[in-house]
Image (spheres, helix red, strand yellow):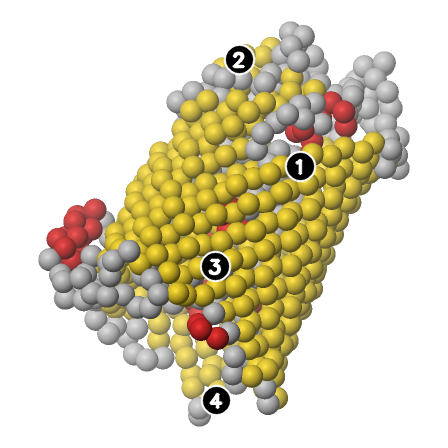
Amino acid sequence: MHRSVIPVATMVAGAWALVAAAEPTALDALRIESTTIDDRFGQRRDEPSSIAVISGEEVDRSHAENLQQILQAIPGITTEIQGGDSIKIHIRGVENQRYMGEKPGVAVVIDGVPVFERTGRVNIDLDDIESVRVIKGGASYLFGEDALSGAVIITTKRGAQKNKVEAEAGSFGYRKGLARAAGQWGDLVGHIQASTRQSDGYWHDSGYRADYLTGKLQWFADEQSDLTLGFERSQREKDSHGTVTGITQARNDPRSVEGQDYARRYDVDLGKVFLNYNRDLASGMNWLTSIYRFTDHTRFISAPQRFDARGRAISDPNAYTTGNDYEQVQQGLKSELRGTAGRLAWLGAIDLRFNTYDNRTFNLVDYKTSPSPRAPVRYAGEVTSQDTTDETVTAAYGELRYRATDALTLTANLRQERIALNYDDQLRNLGLDRSFDQTSWRLGANHALGKDADLFANVSTGFRIPTIQQLFAGTIDPQGSTASNPALAPERSLTKEIGVRGRIAAGIPLRYEAALFQIDRNDYIVATAGQYAVPETGEVNRYENVGGARSRGLELALNGIVNPQWSFDLAYTLLDAKYTSHANFNLLLGDRWGGNYLIEHYDLLGNSIPRTPRHHANLRMHYRPSEPWLVTAELDTVSGYYADELNRLRIGGYTLVNLFGSYEIRRGRSMTWTLFARIDNLFARDYFNTVRASYDANGDGKFDLEDASLTVNPGRVWTAGFNAQF
């Protein structure tokens, strides 16, 4: 299925006039397409929300190194490369203001499981993707917690696949190898696939490696039912994100050893296993059930060392004080039953989750936190924290669709859940708990404007519960500067959206979608004495529901076939994201370690949210001169943005040209060879992948771009390779 696409405003107006004159036509039989388990139900015309779909074939053809290169063609999405093929996803400007490892405000769902990775990153084997579906707007009515701005649903490949081998090489020592074996044995189909990706990286210490072993076995028990067993084992290693400090160093020596990421040397072991059962029942009903277990064991180092055990300054960029050992287990059961009854279609479901998060930190070296003779020495090997958080989610959700007229379909979603958190600190024999009862919903409508176009609209909600650390900061760390606040309420989002989608068959065949949206975030959790620095005024710092933000804008997309040789995809986003409440931002100026500093207080009301470009356009032109050849040229342009909450540090925009090409060689009916090449940033444009700044990092008493953390783009990057399917 092709992803939704959208025209420019004038084209929308022309399409509207065209379809308004058309005669209404009855839609296909009404059915529920929503699911949280897999993608076996396609996007339908009566869908009331903006949805984009990228097929596994598109992902395979892109030969991308990371998911960013795929998602940038979807309006409303911004991504941050976190190193290698690991990225952080944002939708419509939500959570672009955060950067210390929080959740992304997007439900990232892999094979039906909302996956929470400790630093908000997405780790996925790009070679095992069956489809990527993006639902925009508050999506907690389906996926629960953290779906403030939407959901990215990734489904891995199903059983029957061809045998395949593939090899790639590219810039900065990039290498990839893949082998897949597939077969069918009566009613059983399955495959097993092994792949490896690695790179030396452009920046100092930015190399990475990712090894995957995946497989699926699907049993078609009869004409009405099938059973699918899937598994994955992944081992990943990566070091630095490649940031440097200050615009001067970014311009003169972007690959330098200078500068330190707060956390480095990640060693990640991921595993998953799931079993899905699907059955078509009498009277058009369907039953879909999944049980799963996902594991994530992550080890890394953090907290750059500034002083040794005698209080002397440390300048070694490889010196860190803290070892981190984090392990999470996500396991649960989902079951969905759907059916139809005349003009009504319905879905009823349950979602049970039993998640465990174990965290252990320890000192790597002897050190002090300040040069003061009175500062205590922290000794190597000392365990500084050891705790477990158990999370239990009990939820029921459903959807009703009603065909009010032949042209009008009304949709209502509701999800009710209880989330129970239980915290156990093994070092202090401390137990804490808190529960949240949450209701999420969506109301929407889709009106057919003739046989080729639809007007859709919806209002939807999202939420995020407070963390244990926000609720009980002072109880967990009595010596710290932040008090507990167990009365914290969940953050909420409310999305309003209206749009039009359809196709124009006359002249050049076109498909389009356009949407206007507004997301209001309420009860945003902010530290009362300032998010990044606490004034020495004696005021009590704690987390409160005092912040707010609003994102509003326009998303447009369009694809078309000019002639048998030429086709195109166009996506455009206009985004305005601002703070509606954030009265306690504190800017630290001077040397925080030497004690010679001051703190300035600001109210961020009306400021633009950092790293939210106002304009983003992506155009892909596809040219097929003859059957074996396919050439794609991509133009990606991003306007300027602010790197900081105070809106002092402006980063210029950029325009990139990327180029892909492939050539197929067929041998008989069963053998296909493909040669391919990809060049990103063809003209070696200088720009920054990401820029962040929040305080006077160099301690000179000024706040400017010399205090920013910048990741410089590596410039022109190429990959080339081949694959064979048989």
Q: Residue at x 55, y 45 (%)?
A: 416
Q: Is residue 37 left or right of residue 628?
A: right
Closer to the N terminus: mark 4 or mark 2? 2
Cα gap from disc 3 to disc 2, whole angstroms: 51 Å
Closer to the N terminus: mark 1 or mark 2? 1
Q: List the single residue furthest toward the bottom.
A: 668
- 85 above or below 158? above
- 463 above or below 719? above
Badge 2: residue crowd in 10 Å (few <14, some 14–19, many ≥20): some
Judge depth for marks 4 and 1 and give the one in front: 1
Q: Residue at x 56, y 39 (%)?
A: 438
Residue bearing mark 1: 435
Residue bearing mark 3: 347
Residue bearing mark 2: 601
Cα gap from disc 4 to disc 3, whole angstroms: 41 Å
Judge depth for marks 1 and 2 and give the one in front: 1
Cα gap from disc 1 to disc 3, whole angstroms: 27 Å
Cα gap from disc 1 to disc 2, whole angstroms: 34 Å
Residue bearing mark 4: 670
Q: Residue at x 50, y 17 (%)?
A: 583
Q: Secondary structure at mark 3?
A: strand
Query: Quick one: 679 or 92, which is closer to the camera?
Result: 92
Q: List the single residue furthest toward the left.
A: 21
Query: Quick one: 658 or 124, which is closer to the camera?
Result: 124
Closer to the N terminus: mark 1 or mark 3? 3
Q: Secondary structure at mark 1?
A: strand
Q: Answer yes or no: do the residues labelled 3 and 2 have beta carbons within 8 Å?
A: no
Cα gap from disc 4 to disc 2, whole angstroms: 68 Å
The x and y percentages for residue 59 are 46, 65
Q: Residue at x 70, y 49 (%)?
A: 355
Judge depth for marks 3 and 2 and give the one in front: 3
Indicate the amino acid at tag 2.
His
